[in-house]
Amino acid sequence: MQLHLNECNYIDLEPVMRKLQLISHDLCPYVQRAVIALTEKNVPFDRIYVDLAAKPAWFLEISPLGKVPLLKVGDAVVFESAVILEYLEETQSGPLYPADPLLRARQRAWIEFSSAILSDVWGIEVAPTREALDAKAKALTDKFGRVESELGQGPWFAGATFGLVDAAFAPVFRYFESFDAIFDHRILSDKPRVAAWRTALMARPSVRNAVAADYRERLDRFVRSQDGALARLMLSKAA
């Protein structure tokens, strides 16, 4: 079991100071969302990694869905990344949502949209055929077209202020560091605002530090283990 501790200034609005524990997997994009939010809010936490291919008994006892992330607050457990983000927003300083209720609702909706994008990203990773891979790439192209039309001048989703939508989308763009090296997908072509947003996110310290230094190598190993169309393209590039 690995522990990772971020040393930050901690302001907890609960009456008792409690160290948070984030139960994680090294490749999970939903874990990255929580790490980014915790870091942006300067909340210290312990990060505990589990092997989802061999889930330990203690993990299954506290994870109703058998998934990560989990946030342990004392003896209580919060599960599902969107709920964890909401909990952090309600209990920690440094708001990452706007004050206006309508703007908050719209940003929550775009976080859901980012989850749909992650589903298509997963489809690319495990697509058994080139045809299936291209279909998922087309779906992503269309979804990012909607994102392009929503973005303003940046550098962040809502303009000058980094928020939870940025934290939710950052793990999406991390996959493209691998995809760009493997095949000519053109998913982000002709989307200058998305491209600029991606660049800004990948340069932000909370995003960079949300994963281990060898994340790219771990992701590539996972793709190869799926023995799908993307893995075959990866092997052809290496040949």
Image (cartoon, grey):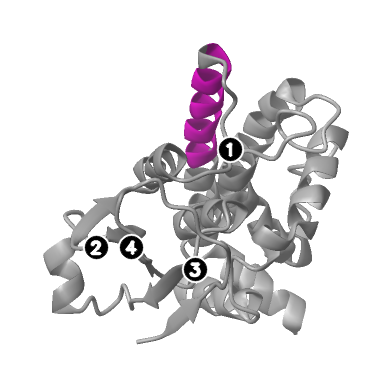
- Vertical position of residue 213 compared to residue 35: above or below: below
Circle 3 residue: 27
Task: Say above or below: 122 vs 8.
Answer: above
Q: Is residue 130 magenta?
A: no
Is residue 120 visible in the rendered structure shown here? yes
Give residue 74's mark.
2
- Badge 4 crowding class, 10 Å Cα cut-off, few under 14, some 14 to 19, many 20 or more, is some
Disc 1 crowd rating (10 Å Cα; few below 14, some 14-19, many 20+) is many
Q: Quadrant of the N terminus?
A: bottom left
Instruction: Please say if the residues under marks 2 and 4 sit with CB atoms less than 8 Å apart.
Output: yes
> Residue tagged by mark 1?
96
Using the rendered view, name the quadrant where residue 66 is placed: bottom left
**The residue tagged with tag 4: helix, strand or loop?**
loop
Q: Give the magenta part as a residue range.
A: 102-116
Question: Residue 164: image x %, image y %?
Answer: 57, 39
Q: Amino acid at mark 3?
A: Leu
